[in-house]
Image (spheres, rainbow, N blue to C red):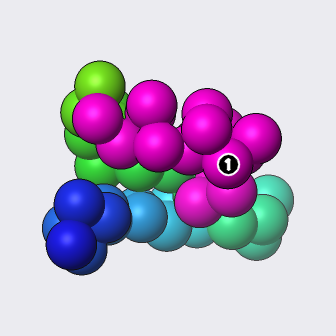
Amino acid sequence: QLFQYVNVVLFKLPDGRIQRSLDRSLTPDQRRILQGLGLDESIYV
């Protein structure tokens, strides 16, 4: 449930590439859970 509202925004760059970004920073709880799993927010982007 803590990750239910993590939104990824896609930006189309002038050269046609797609850039992915989070719409806002992860909460401390979300970061702590990812860290415990050995992951970071780059799994979304």
- Label 1 neighbourhood size at 10 Å, few (<14), some (14-19), many (20+)? few
Prevailing secondary structure class for the magenta stretch in the rendered image: helix
Q: Residue furthest top?
A: 28
Q: Position of residue 38 (x, y in %)?
A: 76, 41
Q: Residue at x 29, y 25 (%)?
A: 28
Q: Is residue 45 left or right of residue 21?
A: right
Q: Is residue 11 left or right of residue 42?
A: left
State the quadrant of the C terminus: bottom right
Query: Does residue 43 show up magenta in the picture?
Result: yes
Query: Does residue 34 show up magenta in the picture?
Result: yes
Q: Position of residue 22 (x, y in %)?
A: 41, 49
Q: Which residues are magenta?
A: 29-45
Instruction: Answer yes or no: is residue 13 visible.
Output: no
Q: Residue at x 76, y 69 (%)?
A: 16
Q: Position of residue 17 (x, y in %)?
A: 78, 65
Name the amino acid, label 1: Leu
Q: Is residue 34 left or right of residue 32?
A: right
Taking depth in this image into account, of 35 and 7 the one nearest to the observer is 35
The quadrant where residue 8 appears: bottom left
Taking depth in this image into account, of 7 and 39 the one nearest to the observer is 39
Q: Which residue is mark 1?
A: 37
Q: Is residue 5 left or right of residue 35?
A: left
Is 21 above or below relative to 18?
Answer: above
Q: Residue at x 51, y 61 (%)?
A: 11
Label 1, secondary structure: give it. loop
Q: Residue furthest front?
A: 36
The quadrant where residue 14 appears: bottom right
State the quadrant of the N terminus: bottom left
